[in-house]
Amino acid sequence: MSIPDSGPIIVLVRPQLGENIGKAARAMLNFGLTRLRLVTPRDGWPNPSAGPAAAGADGVLANAEVFETLADAVADCAHVYATTVRKRGVTKPVLTPEAAAKEAAVAVGGTAFVFGPERSGLETDDVALARAIITVPVNPEFGSLNLAQAVVLCAYEWSKHAPAAGLVQPPAEDALLPPAPQEDLEGLIGHITDLLEPRGYFEPYSRADVTHRTLRNMLTKPGWNHLEVRTMRGVLTTLMRKPGPRER
Amino acid sequence: MSIPDSGPIIVLVRPQLGENIGKAARAMLNFGLTRLRLVTPRDGWPNPSAGPAAAGADGVLANAEVFETLADAVADCAHVYATTVRKRGVTKPVLTPEAAAKEAAVAVGGTAFVFGPERSGLETDDVALARAIITVPVNPEFGSLNLAQAVVLCAYEWSKHAPAAGLVQPPAEDALLPPAPQEDLEGLIGHITDLLEPRGYFEPYSRADVTHRTLRNMLTKPGWNHLEVRTMRGVLTTLMRKPGPRER
């Protein structure tokens, strides 16, 4: 891993299914997170179902640490965020994953994102340990997020805001070829006009100005690069040929 | 569902596992998306593994539509985005989920987010149907995203940028005509191909696939509206005429 071991720690409290632990590990590593902590996983640890679901993120599982209590698991963390979908009887700031990720990206001291068990979510006492709450804005009529999905959203948001994540970004649009110079485009417009003119395309001539403008707007819209302009001219040249068998 | 049936359509191409289809449906509904389309799911449809994994998003599965080809599945969509992790030999804009979601939130005409099979991802020919590519920026050393995870990230980003549930905002670009439906574009591509074929444009035939793809990419790039597509077809029809004096 060339990615620094510096991102938030993901803490799964009393996770039920090994498969979800594995999927959470995979989601973490997809976005450059490597530190996983488990609080009393239901079926013990290690769990044979976790490995296959991790789909290659074995290092994250191998380095996972197991704790008896959430308090132990976050003892060394300066910034603890509890994820929950429901309102709790606690007065803490409620952040979106995006807002929490922005804080975590510049935080001094360790950050933990804490996730509850699949069915029930975090207990009020767990939430009480956190400085702030992360709530994913979801469909109010279908709000139950899968555990690994909640993890991936937080990891993804962290990676968007953390320069240290070192993720591959899509190439900027300028990596694509620029639109052809205007004179190439004029050459194409002239070419197609010369072919259309004797075939009556611009009749009636009272409407010819509008027709010319329509054609020009349409051919200007694509922003074709010089190769695409050349291809289009090749198409025009080909269309002028007589149809028939060719290649041998 | 009080959420309007207006978000992007999620298209899963040749999905392998019913469980992943169910998880994708759950992720969609979490963020207010309800329209699911399947292209030749490996194990047929319906799939008994999908329901349990959907965890209550049964309506999304019940309304899922099955298609033989991706072209059929996106025929009525004006904006088709292909998700892929790898660089492809196609010249199309590459967007993050966030950038695509921002476009989709204000798009006029239907939007489709297209996802490939679990192991292999989308084929080059699938990608060629799209106007743009969505690439999730991931850990370069561990880039393989789970299918349902890729869906949840796109659905989540869409929900962040879409108008609030139940409210239909006036479209930002209502002065502009949307890109023509994909089937109009296919009609144009078929028209030009039929004219070029007997004139030897696709020779040598060893290169025909590449030539077809170049042509398709070039004609997909403009995002022509239905009037512009019709104009282009009129141009082609005119070019087939014999030149000579006409009007009077």
Image: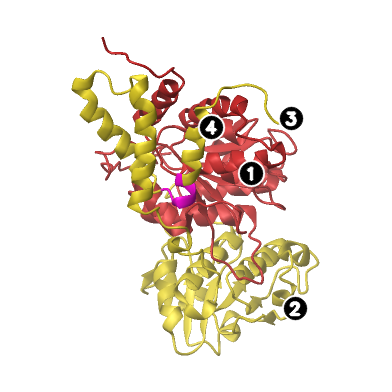
Chain colours: A yellow, B red
Residue A132 placement: quadrant: bottom left
The amino acid type, in three-letter code, at marker 1 is: Val
Of the numbered discs 4 and 3, the one sitting upstream in the chain is 4
Q: Which residue is mark 3?
A: A248
Residue B242 placement: quadrant: top left
Characterize the local packing of mark 3: few (<14), some (14-19) or many (20 or more) Cα atoms within 10 angstroms. Answer: few
Q: Kindly indicate whether the residue at mark 2 contacts the one at mark 4 (C-beta within 8 angstroms).
A: no
SS type, badge 2: helix
A62 left or right of B131?
right
Nearer the observer: mark 4 or 1; the answer is 4
| In the rendered image, residues at marks 4 and 2 fall on the same chain | yes
Q: CA distance from mark 2 to mark 1?
A: 46 Å
Residue A25 placement: quadrant: bottom right
Looking at the image, which is closer to me, B137 or B46?
B137
Of the numbered discs 3 and 2, the one sitting upstream in the chain is 2
| In the rendered image, residues at marks 3 and 1 fall on the same chain | no
SS type, badge 4: helix
